[in-house]
């Protein structure tokens, strides 16, 4: 009787380059963007470096150039895209349940009839959504998780005051001050890794971007202000949600609130 070789299942170790990178890119109170600090220093202090690396895209002298013209008749999508900007403050007014629900439903909920407004690699839906709800009509302030298949948010049995948590966790305090709700995007890496191996980390980041952009555009359409927030203390979020920070970890976040009509005047 032949004996089959023992099957060794892949096991996530800390010599996994995606996991190592994820850990190296975290912000903490003690280490702030540590590995990129020297590049930032160079850009700020060396005009030549800024001139060569700081430009948005390469130009190709001597090649044929074709001008891009935008249709003059416009469309809802281009109106929304043109009006979007990253708010630096919010007014303290409540957000209606209807607008809150619409933003989440249209961008992140998975329906039988039309799928989801944002694409998902392999239809695996590896990005979980958690929210700090501060001032949304009909919802007590708290920490919530979204069930995208049932289209409901669940209030988690956590004692944290969501506003105080945001004030401790966001690097930019102005974005915690009056936001109505703050969305955190959490990757469940195992869900992707089972199909995509080392490509999973890339896909998790890309899918998070799709979700965030869809939410930002919905918010804009319904008159809410928003700001993408990459500046947060990762471990605070991971600890709050009991995530191990590697297999499941927060990747990105967006603050939403009522527009602060004084914002422009302050600039
Ligand atoms: C990945 C990412 C992370 C960001 N993180 C922050 C942040 O932590 N705080 C903040 O005030 N803005 C943040 N922003 C917003 C940018 O500062 C903003 O998009 C940029 O200044 C361009 O302005 P606009 O969005 O109004 O066009 C972030 C944007 C992106 C794409």
Image: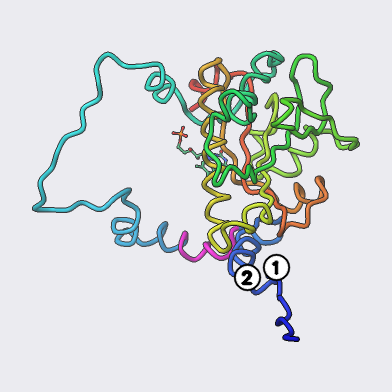
Asked where in the image residue 26 lies, by quadrant, the reply is bottom right
Considering every residue shown, the one lying at the far front of the view is: 1
Asked where in the image residue 160 lies, by quadrant, the reply is top right
Tell me how the rendering is colored.
Answer: rainbow
Residue 47: image x %, image y %? 32, 58
Closer to us: 244 or 240: 244
* In this rendering, position of residue 163 left or right of residue 254: right
**Which residue range is magenta in the image?**
33-40
- The answer to if 3 sits in the magenta stretch is no
Q: Which residue is mark 1?
A: 12
Q: Quadrant of the N terminus?
A: bottom right
Q: Secondary structure at mark 1?
A: loop
What residue is rendered at 60% in x and 27% in y? 89
Q: Would you say the beta carbon of the disc 2 residue lies within 8 angstroms of ligand 1? A: no
Which label was assigned to residue 16? 2
Q: Is the residue marked by circle 2 packed among few (<14), some (14-19), or many (20+) residues within 10 Å?
A: few
Q: CA distance from mark 2 to mark 1?
A: 7 Å
What residue is rendered at 62% in x and 53% in y? 192
């Amino acid at each position: 009787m032949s004996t089959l070789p023992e099957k060794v299942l892949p096991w996530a170790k800390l010599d996994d380059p995606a996991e190592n990178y994820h850990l190296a890119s975290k912000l903490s109170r003690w280490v702030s963007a540590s590995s990129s600090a020297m590049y930032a220093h160079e850009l700020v202090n060396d005009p030549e470096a800024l001139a060569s690396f700081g430009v948005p895209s390469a130009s190709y002298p001597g090649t044929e150039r074709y001008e891009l013209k935008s249709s003059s008749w416009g469309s809802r999508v281009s109106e929304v895209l043109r009006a979007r900007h990253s708010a630096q403050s919010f007014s303290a007014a409540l957000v209606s349940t209807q607008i809150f629900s619409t933003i989440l439903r249209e961008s992140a909920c998975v329906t039988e009839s039309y799928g989801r407004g944002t694409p998902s690699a392999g239809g695996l839906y590896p990005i979980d959504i958690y929210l700090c709800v501060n001032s949304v009509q009909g919802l007590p302030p708290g920490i919530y998780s979204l069930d995208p298949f049932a289209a409901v948010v669940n209030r988690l049995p956590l004692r944290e005051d969501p506003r105080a948590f945001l004030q401790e966790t966001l690097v930019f305090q102005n974005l915690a001050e009056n936001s109505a709700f703050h969305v955190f995007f959490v990757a469940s890496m195992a869900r992707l890794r089972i199909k995509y191996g080392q490509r999973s980390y890339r896909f998790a980041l890309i899918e998070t971007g799709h979700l965030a952009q869809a939410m930002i555009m919905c918010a804009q359409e319904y008159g809410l202000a928003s700001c993408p927030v990459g500046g947060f203390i990762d471990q605070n979020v991971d600890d709050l949600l009991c995530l191990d920070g590697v297999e499941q970890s927060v990747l990105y976040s967006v603050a939403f609130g009522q527009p602060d009509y004084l914002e422009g005047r302050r600039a």
